[in-house]
Amino acid sequence: MKKQDKILTIILIAGLFVFILSADLFFDSYIKRVLNLCAIYTILALSMNLINGFTGLFSLGHAGFMAIGAYVVGIFTVPVEMRSMVFYLKPMHPLIANIELPFFAALILGGLLAALVAFLIGAPVLRLRDDYLAIATLGFSEIIRIIITNAQSITNGSLGIKNIPPTANIWWIFGTAFVTIVFIILLISSSYGRAFKAIREDEIAAEAMGINLFNHKVLSFIIGAFFAGIGGGLYGALLGTVDPKNFLFVLTYNFLLIIVLGGMGSVSGTIISAFIVTAGQEWLRFLDEPLSIGSFDIPLFRPGFRMVVFSILLMLIVLFYRNGLMGTKELNWDMLKRIGSKFSFKRPKGGEAK
Amino acid sequence: MSNVVPILKTQGITMRFGGITAVNNLSIEVNPGEIVALIGPNGAGKTTAFNMITGVYTPTEGRIIYCGKDITGMKPDQITKNGIARTFQNIRLFKKLSVLENILIARHLRLKSDFLSATLRLPQYRMEEKQMREKVDVLINEFGLSKYQHEVASSLPYGVQRRLEIARALATEPSLLLLDEPAAGMNPKETEELTHFIRDIKERYNLTVFLIEHHMELVMEISERIYVLDFGETIAKGTANEIQNNPKVIEAYLGVEEDA
Ligand SMILES: Nc1ncnc2c1ncn2[C@@H]1O[C@H](COP(=O)(O)OP(=O)(O)OP(=O)(O)O)[C@@H](O)[C@H]1O
Ligand SMILES: [Mg+2]
């Protein structure tokens, strides 16, 4: 990196720090919550992009990995004395009923468990190609949800786990997002990241270059699942409650929308798009409310309409703008400087061409 | 001659796809330091033979011995690690990646650091990455690719793409290089240059070369020995002279004259 760019990067990070500080102090809880959601979705979409965009695996199991992380945080951070209240239908299994973990430990454990599950299902599933892989991972994610719904003495079944301590404040969440972003950038710019991209570009050529396809696919899948578990843990702690219905397929679909919009294979595109889509979905909530002008009810406005709008958006991107915002490119300072100079008022000497 | 241990030896390899026998009972020997050619009309089974040697297909019958080791049924990546590298008939570069990345990828197989040390840029990885880049730099310069190194592979002129594919194969540090129609789509002058180029890299990198080619001038000039396939059968083998005068070969080629 050039020296000037290094300084700019430091300024940017300091600026973000100040922004979070002031957000923490001055913003109301609704806006803070939306910002937190944006950061959590950044973690989730980025980890999905590692699998789908950088390694070229069509996996749709992200909600499942996320659920694992969220439930581990839920199960192990609810204070022991509150558990009989939360698990009122069926008491918690005695083996875990008295184990309470600090938030950070539960978060990491959730990530590790998601990674372990990814390792176990990766072995059979990652031998499949494209559409078969998508179907298998989708099925896996539903299975996780069904197991959670039925393992009542561990997960409280369909009642969900309530009273998760709200440890995940803006600092936790943005801090974790920051670490995730840095980790993934460093990973994909390493030799392993290049191997992932080689697999995405051409499996036969990658294999002929000595890259073990299966090992590298499993590696990418596991790392992606780990961060999905972490994102899920933060999500559970942010909401204060987890419930099997939080982890329906539509969630994975959301992440897919984010990475397609941002650019499959672009970290900066994913971050920008995670914020736009998440904040946009909050802002467009009114689409789900009945709306009337005078006494006339506008017919489309009802629960679910918001999702229709986003689905159409996804279709339009795929049809007309397949590379999304960034394609596989990254935002860098040179690009920003170029954009900046376009918008500045300095006119080139010699005047405009008429 | 008879006491030389061949670097590559196939023992009656056969490849059947359903009802089609693409290659039947092929036995070849390639000795260290040789340039050997595999020729034959379109659809003769040449690429299929390469695909068996490099592990893309496992032969239906027969064994493949490389440096005295049975490599039949090994995966392509293991075979490359053992020292056989190849190029493809229809160039298979990592199209959206830069020239530099294309070649760096071919050095990944020699990396010892695990993914965590790589991601965290621990000292051992940093050292490895540095050496990796130095070696790739040398290749890029020797192959005259320096002015293209940051361009994406798909944007390069055709001839340069072919050269890049050879450079990438060499980055894996092979002892045996398989070239599948390296002169495809080249004019006589480019073919002539390629002939020298292949000889040159063979000497410089201490290689054994096994190549498929349709350009006869190149084949006849460069190869010490030639195998001829037709409909999966080995119809002839020998020196350039022997092959040129072999009636079976002439017949096989005349039969498909209009395709050439
Ligand atoms: N994967 C496959 N499945 C079925 N048939 C195949 C397969 N690969 C090759 N073949 C068949 O095997 C035969 C030999 O093909 P191959 O590609 O080896 O020929 P070739 O000698 O390389 O020809 P060319 O000079 O045109 O490249 C052809 O009839 C081809 O259709
Ligand atoms: Mg061929």
Image: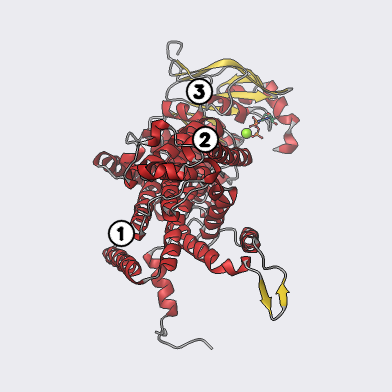
Residue B113 rendering spot, x and y as whole percentages: 32, 36
Residue lying at the far top of the rendered structure: B3
Both marks 1 and 2 on one chain:
yes
Residue A5 rendering spot, x and y as whole percentages: 31, 65
Question: Badge 3 local density, few (<14 within 10 Å), some, or many (20+)?
Answer: some
**Quadrant showing the C terminus of chain A:** bottom right
Report if residue B197 is visible in the image.
no
Residue A105 rendering spot, x and y as whole percentages: 33, 42
**The disc numbered 2 marks a residue on which chain?**
A
The residue carrying mark 1 is: A1
The residue carrying mark 2 is: A151
SS type, badge 3: loop
Look at 45% across and 88% down and name the residue there: A351
Look at 30% across and 67% down and name the residue there: A21
Instruction: Specify the amino acid type for callout 1.
Output: Met
Q: CA distance from mark 3 to mark 2?
A: 43 Å
Q: In this picture, is B257 found above or below B129?
A: above
Q: CA distance from mark 1 to mark 3?
A: 42 Å
Question: Badge 2 local density, few (<14 within 10 Å), some, or many (20+)?
Answer: few
Can you tell me which quadrant of the image ligand 2 is in? top right
Q: Nearer the viewer, residue B225 or A352?
A: A352
Report if residue A299 is visible in the image.
yes
SS type, badge 1: loop
Instruction: Specify the amino acid type for callout 2.
Output: Ala
The residue carrying mark 3 is: B74
Residue A337 rendering spot, x and y as whole percentages: 38, 71
